[in-house]
């Protein structure tokens, strides 16, 4: 069952372009360096907040990624554009066949 990382953060309006410009390199670094990275979606919310929805193959892959932090330039540039962390949660994506 895939693990979903939900990270909500604030970005100063003056740094939104920096955040968006750095996103492709951040995703490329995740693909190259993070085992179990399956994909990510970035959602713009009201009041200068954003939600990053990242899917991992397993909780262990997510934990290993967290331990690495901003170890590559693309990841570091994306993180640098973030003003503050609002929340960070981990969940599991259910298999619909198991529910039905």
Image (tube, rainbow, N blue to C red):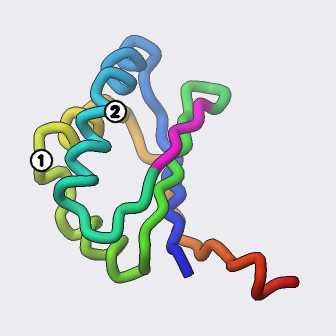
Disc 2, SS: helix
Whether residue 83 is visible:
yes
The percent coordinates of residue 76 (x first, y second) are: 18, 41
Residue to which mark 2 is pinned: 23
Secondary structure beneath dot 1 equals loop
Q: Quadrant of residue 11?
A: top left
Residue 89 higher or lower than 70, as above or below: below
Q: Is residue 86 visible?
A: no
Q: Which residues are magenta?
A: 40-44
Magenta-colored segment: predominant secondary structure: strand
**In front here: 44 or 40?**
40
Residue 49, position as x, y percentages in the image? 56, 33
Q: Quadrant of residue 73?
A: top left
Residue on which the image places disc 1: 72
For this view, does 78 lie left or right of residue 71?
right
Q: In front: 1, or 86?
A: 1
Q: Position of residue 89 (x, y in %)?
A: 53, 65
**Residue at left 27%, top 40%?**
26
């Amino acid at each position: 069952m895939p693990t979903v990382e939900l990270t909500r953060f604030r970005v100063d309006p003056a740094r939104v372009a920096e955040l968006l410009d750095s996103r492709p390199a951040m995703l490329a670094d995740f693909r190259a360096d993070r085992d179990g990275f399956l994909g990510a979606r970035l959602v713009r919310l009201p009041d200068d907040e954003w939600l990053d929805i990242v899917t991992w193959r397993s909780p262990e892959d997510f934990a290993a990624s967290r331990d690495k932090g901003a170890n590559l330039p693309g990841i570091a540039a994306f993180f640098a554009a973030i003003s503050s962390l609002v929340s960070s949660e981990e969940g599991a994506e259910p298999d619909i066949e198991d529910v039905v």
